[in-house]
Image (cartoon, coloured by chain):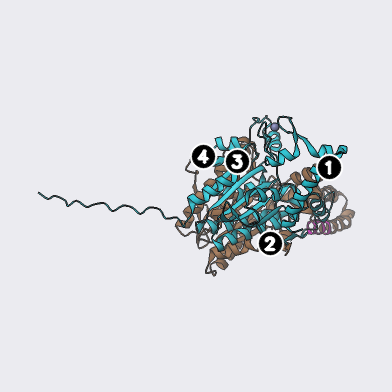
Chain colours: A cyan, B brown
Amino acid sequence: MDLKDWFANRKKNNETAQAKQILSTEEYCALWISCFQCRELLYTRDLRQNLQVCPKCHYHFRIGALDRIEHLSDANSFCETEANLISSDPLKFFDTLSYEDRLKEANQKSGLKEAIITGTCTIQGRPTCLAAMDFGYFGGSMGSVVGEKITRIIELALEQRLPLIIISSSGGARMQEGILSLMQLAKTSAALKKLHDSAILYISVLTEPTFGGVTASFAMLGDIIIAEPGARIGFAGRRVIEQTIRQKLPADFQTAEYLLKHGQIDMVIERAKLPQTIANLIDLHSLDCHQPKPKAIAKTPLKTH
Amino acid sequence: MTTGKLPPLEFELPLANLNTQIEALERQLPNNPALEQEIFELHKQYDNLKRSIYGNLRAIDRLAIARHPQRPYTRDYLDRFDPDWIELHGDRHGVDDPAMVCGLLKLGDYRVLIVGTQKGRNIREKQLCNFGMPQPEGYRKALRCFKHAEKFNLPIVTLIDTPGAYPGMTAEEHNQAQAIAYNLFELANLKVPIISVILGEGGSGGALAIGLTNTILMLENSVYSVISPEGCASILWRQPTKVQEACESMKITAQENKDLGIIDDIIEEPLGGAHHNWNLIAKTTQNYIIKHLDKLNLENDIVEHRTRKFRKIGCFKD
Ligand SMILES: [Zn+2]
């Protein structure tokens, strides 16, 4: 399905849902959700209108790549790139299920072809390259396709000299592609180095959750690093660390706020303010805007006597 | 040092048992010359078994060799490459991580920087080196030395033997993800030739942090993987006992990594593993490094050579 169709379809579905009067239990459950943090019962339509942020406690629910793009980019401005890049199964990996079956399952669950969508768009009128990861597809894990799509969008940003925004949400490298997944850390970081040397702005946005190989590569290499409130971000998972050091970690360990306190990120920005913040940051780094020239200093002749 | 009698690894048990049997018979031989024929046959059987065991090592057997407590570590290689090697210490920001060793030395006709992860031999050393798992400061120390080598136009060799990055609280607080990412970022653009050798365990991001190099070599029984086989087993199978399955599925051996186009060459080990002859494996490794440094000298754009290598890695349908 084309992205534009997807947006149109969803709008239509919302309207028909509103038109219905009598509800089944299933429909009732689909209409109401309890906030994961404050347990408040929320009407899903209100929640969606509030960008999936709890109006009471500001808990930021996880959102998918398509919602993310819809929220960030100006209406109808998003043009998807590399939409047909899909995973193969180079290792013929099999755990309790085959990798191929897991890919099918991920596709059915999320409706996506991979754990990332890339493209160009405008954000409040500013042209950008945008990539959004989706935790709903295979835990947002990075295999060859995610690595390649990230690399290609970096290369596009370099070629078109456009600012790059990557929204990360990932459990880490995709084990089913073995060492090839690990090498995507190298590939994406090397591509970012070229972008960096060309002085093109890269803003990395970290969302719930961002871990492992994604954090240890492009996510932590932003010129500016923004995180969403409450998002959990780290390299190793909390449980693994607790098992290793045999002690309980502080409740706020690896949260966006904790990272801010420890000097790892530039800012924590709530979802509603993200487009404006990104637009402002782009303006502040725009190479088209000239800085004032240094004012000539009047020379006073040196007195010799 | 050639190590003395070593306890056999699990897959070596049939061989060890047969050897005990032969030794027992040989002790009786002076009193019973009729045993000679039987001993001769058993020796033949032993040689066949040895060839068949070491010729058909499974991934999990190689993992055991890669983790052998007597396997030579980074410092053992440095001492044999150049006994006069000079160690460089510290990240210049408050920490010197013993799990990351950096040194300047002569390697044949080359003057090089070697940076490697270090495991400990005894309990005290193991704790000091955090079992070969560097802290973020270790990766930053490595990068500081990489920059030094670049400034003086010295080729870099990295020696990798680490289970991976350390899942610890301060490691997270000191941003180990950023330390690894930043090494990748900077390694991509260093203006000198870089060669890495996986000596034992090539564990995930911790290995890659010094592994984005022009040429990657692996010792015959070393392993290189995206996650430890134990980690993979407990996540995907939800059973820590499925290590063998995880080893097979992830394709962690030197030959598999070569077939996947990740590494460039395999360094042969003494029969049974590098721990049987430290001097020999050090000499062989040195020869391989020099051969590949000679080869890289022919490249006129060493940065382009390196980035092109990694740009190509990935398998997908377009
Ligand atoms: Zn709430």
Identity, as a three-letter code, of the amino acid under mark 3: Cys
Identity, as a three-letter code, of the amino acid under mark 1: Lys
Q: What whole-number distance in Å separates the C-alpha atoms at marks 1 and 4? A: 65 Å
Q: Is residue B236 left or right of residue B124?
A: right
Label 1 Cα neighbours within 10 Å, binned few <14 / some 14-19 / many ≥20: few
Q: Please give the residue where the numbered disc 3 appears in the rendered image.
A: B129
Which mark's residue is nearer the viewer, 2 or 3? 2
Label 2 Cα neighbours within 10 Å, binned few <14 / some 14-19 / many ≥20: some
| Range of residues picked out in magenta | B48-56
Badges 4 and 2, same chain:
no
Q: What whole-number distance in Å separates the C-alpha atoms at marks 3 and 1? A: 66 Å
Res A82 label: 2
Identity, as a three-letter code, of the amino acid under mark 2: Glu
Label 3 Cα neighbours within 10 Å, binned few <14 / some 14-19 / many ≥20: many
Q: What whole-number distance in Å separates the C-alpha atoms at marks 4 and 3? A: 13 Å
Percent x, y of residue B264: 65, 63
Residue A297 seen in this snapshot: yes
Q: What chain does badge 2 belong to?
A: A
Res A20 label: 1
Does the residue tagged 4 have its C-beta within 8 Å of any atom of ligand 1? no
Query: In the rendered image, which quarter is residue B133 located in?
Result: top right
What is the count of numbered marks?
4
Measured along the vertical axis of the image, is residue A79 above or below residue B275? below
**Could you say which is closer to the camera, residue A41 or residue A11?**
A11
Which mark's residue is nearer the viewer, 4 or 3? 4
Res B95 label: 4
Query: In the rendered image, which quarter is residue A242 located in?
Result: top right
Does the residue tagged 3 have its C-beta within 8 Å of any atom of ligand 1? no
**Label pair 3/1, CB-CB below 8 angstroms:** no
**Label pair 2/3, CB-CB below 8 angstroms:** no
